[in-house]
């Protein structure tokens, strides 16, 4: 479903704070196409806002759906599978993994040490499924925490660094 206005669909996908805000860094994702994305930087520099902008661009150009997962929730689902062997939670994680549409995993810092997360990224990469991620972790920190995930990201994703001051403090 190609959409003329993305306002209708944004409300189901993009977190409320970012629905009507344009990113100051749109030029950084102008050539993204179907490539996966990793944005990193400090607190409040616009990582989630730029990710939301990428989603808006994807929705305006493609006949697809995008799902938005919070890293902490994905971590909780993975931990729950490992503890309880819950079929419902396993299906939720498999739906994330096997979804051919673009997926956002907002703040992957929570899940980078989980082997199941490595498998999710590998599966999505091998099948050409676009994944948009962000975190506070610099490439050096990410490589130290999870060399395999950094290898996947560094070799296959567009990596963008955002820096500056915490913009959320300016709004108050």
Image: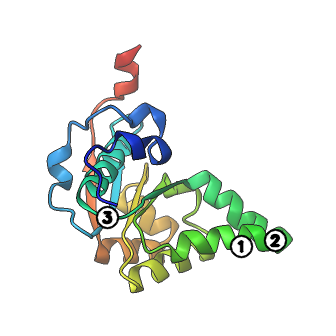
User: Are the residues flagged by discs 2 and 3 in contact, CB closer than 8 Å?
Assistant: no
Q: Quadrant of residue 22?
A: top left
Quadrant occupied by the C terminus: top left
Residue sitting nearer the eye, 98 or 138: 98
Q: Which residue lies at the image location 62% right of the left edge and 60% below the top edge?
A: 74
Q: Which dot, 3 or 1, sits closer to the camera?
A: 3
Instruction: Pinpoint residue 12: horizontal percent, then vertical percent.
Output: 49, 46
Classify mark 3: helix, strand or loop.
loop
Classify mark 1: helix, strand or loop.
helix
Q: Which residue lies at the image location 77% right of the left edge and 64% below the top edge?
A: 80
Residue sitting nearer the eye, 115 or 104: 104
Quadrant occupied by the N terminus: bottom left
Q: Distance of mark 3 from mark 1, alpha carbons?
A: 28 Å
Q: Mark 2 — residue?
A: 86
Q: Which residue lies at the image location 43% right of the left edge and 48% below the top edge?
A: 136
Q: Mark 3 — residue?
A: 63
Q: Residue 146: which disc?
A: none
| Callout 1 crowding tier (Cα within 10 Å): few <14, some 14–19, many ≥20 | some
Instruction: Pinpoint residue 65: horizontal percent, then vertical percent.
Output: 42, 61
Q: Quadrant of residue 14?
A: top left
- On screen, 106 above or below 158? above
Q: Distance of mark 1 from mark 2, alpha carbons?
A: 6 Å
Instruction: Pinpoint residue 132: horizontal percent, then vertical percent.
Output: 38, 60
Mark nearer the N terminus (2 vs 3) = 3
Mark nearer the N terminus (3 vs 1) = 3
Q: Mark 1 — residue?
A: 90
User: Are the residues flagged by discs 1 and 2 in contact, CB closer than 8 Å?
Assistant: yes
Residue sitting nearer the eye, 101 or 27: 101
Q: Position of 74 compared to 148: left or right? A: right
- On screen, 24 above or below 81? above
Classify mark 2: helix, strand or loop.
loop
Q: Distance of mark 2 from mark 3, alpha carbons?
A: 33 Å
């Amino acid at each position: 479903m190609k959409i003329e206005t993305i306002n209708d669909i944004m409300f189901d996908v993009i977190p409320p704070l970012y629905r009507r805000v344009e990113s100051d860094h749109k030029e950084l994702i102008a050539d993204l196409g179907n490539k996966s994305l990793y944005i990193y930087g400090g607190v409040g520099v616009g990582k989630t806002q730029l990710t939301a902008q990428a989603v808006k661009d994807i929705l305006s150009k493609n006949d697809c759906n995008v799902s938005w997962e919070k890293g902490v929730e994905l971590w909780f689902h993975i931990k729950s599978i490992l503890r309880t062997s819950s079929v419902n939670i396993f299906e939720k994680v498999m739906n994330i993994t096997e979804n051919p549409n673009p997926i956002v995993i907002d703040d992957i810092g929570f899940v980078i040490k989980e082997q199941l997360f490595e498998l999710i990224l590998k599966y999505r990469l091998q099948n050409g499924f676009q994944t948009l991620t962000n975190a506070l972790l610099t490439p050096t920190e990410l490589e130290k925490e999870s060399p395999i995930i950094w290898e996947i990201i560094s070799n296959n994703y567009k990596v963008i660094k955002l820096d500056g001051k915490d913009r959320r403090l300016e709004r108050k």
